[in-house]
Image (cartoon, grey):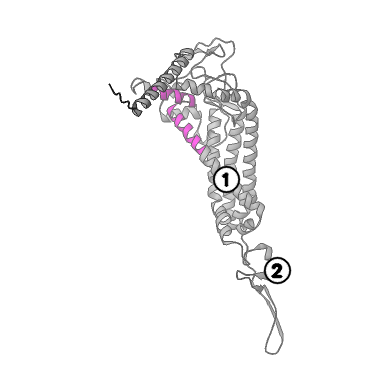
């Protein structure tokens, strides 16, 4: 008689279950890929499909939101200027009238440039290719407009048309940044950063006293404007002390009356004692610091692109080309050198000067038409 002894192998069971599950997963994956196979399928393609609702929202509603953004920029800038005059002017006039005059003149010069360049950036057309005209310099055909597309021209999905030397569509301007208004856009950012930096430096001591010194030390009987002239005050120990000695008698019982000196109240202490003014200081601090870091970073990025002779769109395209080509094989044809790039961008040709046409508001247009471009082989002197 043969006796058979059975043994249960747990490892073989788990191995078989794992293999079965893996096989089913492969079957599902193979079925999915068989039904949805696309040679263009990639991670970028999947991301684009997931972001398609956001693109649709931007394309259909960015035009309406742009008007709201323009109103917000105008309102917030006006609020900051009003608060600067309301609080900063009395504070600096108390410290130094001569310094106040300088700050007012310098601040209004910055404000003039901010307002001018923002208005011009909003109202100036970025430039469009001529409709129905034969463009000899056309580099390609726009797939959406079905029309000739000059070099450095790109199609804006928000404006639904091609834009000459397009940089990007800016909702804060409610306009595209292109060939004719790129200088206004950049100088607006630069002067806005300079303006908030000026306010931060001029109001640093005031903000420090209001938000830190007086907030932590408190207002005592020596500096509380609400208790000036009151017959009694409450000192730090909680004991009532007289502000004025009502009567003092000499040895011959004759009365003698005299006053105690009333402490001087500074403008910073008055602002701290006023809840509305103190909230205004907090608002100014938050707004100026936010604009300084956000717009300052954006200004640096655009300044780097200008130094390279490229727009924001071209910077992404050129970055890809630099990765796929060696440095000797790829060169941006519109990069004429840092100094020339800045001169061309700011329009400092044909006798224009930095003092008159950059430091002061100037509506001068860029050279050329935006349809054809000079490359690294052409010098500035050869420009019309």
- Left-right relation of 324 to 371: left
The foreground one among 11 and 384 is 11
Q: Which residue ends up furthest to the bottom in the rendered image?
A: 252
Image coordinates of residue 135 in percent, x first then y, are 53, 11
**Image mark count:** 2
Mark 2–mark 1 distance (CA, rounded to whole Å): 37 Å
Residue receiving disc 2: 230
Q: Residues within 10 Å of mark 1 (few under 14, many from 20)?
A: few
The residue positioned 60% from the left and 57% from the top of the image is 268
The answer to whether one can see residue 205 in this image is: yes
Residue 113, by quadrant, is: top right
The foreground one among 103 and 380 is 103
Question: Overall secondary structure of the magenta stretch?
Answer: helix
Image coordinates of residue 209 in percent, x first then y, are 56, 56
The residue positioned 63% from the left and 54% from the top of the image is 90
Residue receiving disc 1: 286
Q: Which mark is residue 218?
A: none
The answer to whether residue 96 is above or below residue 152 is: below
Residue 93 counted in the magenta span: no
Residue 327, by quadrant, is: top left
Q: Which residue ends up furthest to the left in the rendered image?
A: 1
The span picked out in magenta is 295-321
The residue positioned 40% from the left and 24% from the top of the image is 17
Q: Residues within 10 Å of mark 2 (few under 14, many from 20)?
A: few
The foreground one among 257 and 374 is 257
Q: Quick one: quadrant of the N terminus?
A: top left
Residue 308 counted in the magenta span: yes
The answer to whether one can see residue 332 in this image is: no
Secondary element under disc 2, as helix, strand or loop, is loop
Secondary element under disc 1, as helix, strand or loop, is helix
The answer to whether residue 288 is above or below residue 370 is: below
The answer to whether residue 263 is above or below residue 323 is: below
């Amino acid at each position: 008689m043969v006796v058979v002894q059975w043994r249960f192998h747990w490892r073989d069971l788990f191995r078989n279950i794992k293999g079965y599950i893996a096989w089913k997963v492969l079957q599902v994956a193979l079925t999915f890929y068989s039904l949805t196979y696309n040679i263009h399928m990639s991670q970028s393609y999947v991301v684009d499909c997931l972001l398609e609702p956001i693109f649709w929202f931007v394309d259909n509603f960015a035009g309406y939101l742009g008007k709201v953004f323009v109103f917000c920029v105008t309102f917030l800038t006006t609020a900051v200027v009003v608060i600067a005059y309301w609080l900063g002017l009395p504070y600096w006039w108390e410290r130094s009238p001569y310094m106040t005059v300088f700050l007012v003149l310098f601040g209004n010069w910055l404000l003039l440039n901010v307002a001018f360049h923002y208005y011009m950036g909003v109202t100036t057309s970025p430039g469009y290719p001529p409709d129905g005209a034969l463009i000899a310099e056309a580099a390609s055909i726009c797939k959406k407009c079905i029309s000739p597309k000059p070099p450095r021209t790109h199609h804006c999905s928000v404006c639904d048309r091609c834009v000459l030397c397009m940089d990007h569509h800016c909702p804060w301007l409610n306009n595209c940044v292109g060939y004719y208004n790129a200088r206004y856009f950049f100088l607006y950012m630069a002067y806005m950063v300079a303006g908030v930096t000026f306010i931060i430096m001029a109001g640093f001591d005031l903000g420090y006293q209001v938000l830190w010194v007086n907030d932590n030390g408190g207002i005592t009987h020596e500096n509380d404007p609400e208790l000036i002239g009151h017959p009694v005050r409450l000192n730090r120990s909680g004991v009532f002390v007289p502000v004025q000695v009502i009567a003092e008698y000499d040895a011959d019982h004759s009365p003698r009356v005299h006053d105690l000196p009333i402490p001087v109240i500074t403008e910073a202490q008055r602002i701290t004692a006023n809840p509305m003014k103190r909230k205004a200081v907090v608002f100014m601090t938050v707004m100026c610091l936010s604009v300084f870091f956000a717009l300052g970073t954006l200004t640096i990025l655009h300044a780097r692109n200008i130094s390279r002779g490229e727009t924001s769109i071209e910077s992404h395209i050129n970055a890809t080309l630099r990765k796929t080509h060696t440095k000797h094989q790829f060169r941006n044809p519109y990069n004429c050198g840092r100094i020339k790039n800045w001169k061309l961008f700011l329009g400092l040709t044909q006798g224009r000067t930095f003092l008159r046409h950059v430091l002061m508001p100037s509506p001068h247009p860029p050279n050329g038409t935006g349809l054809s471009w000079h490359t690294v082989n052409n010098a500035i002197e050869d420009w019309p």
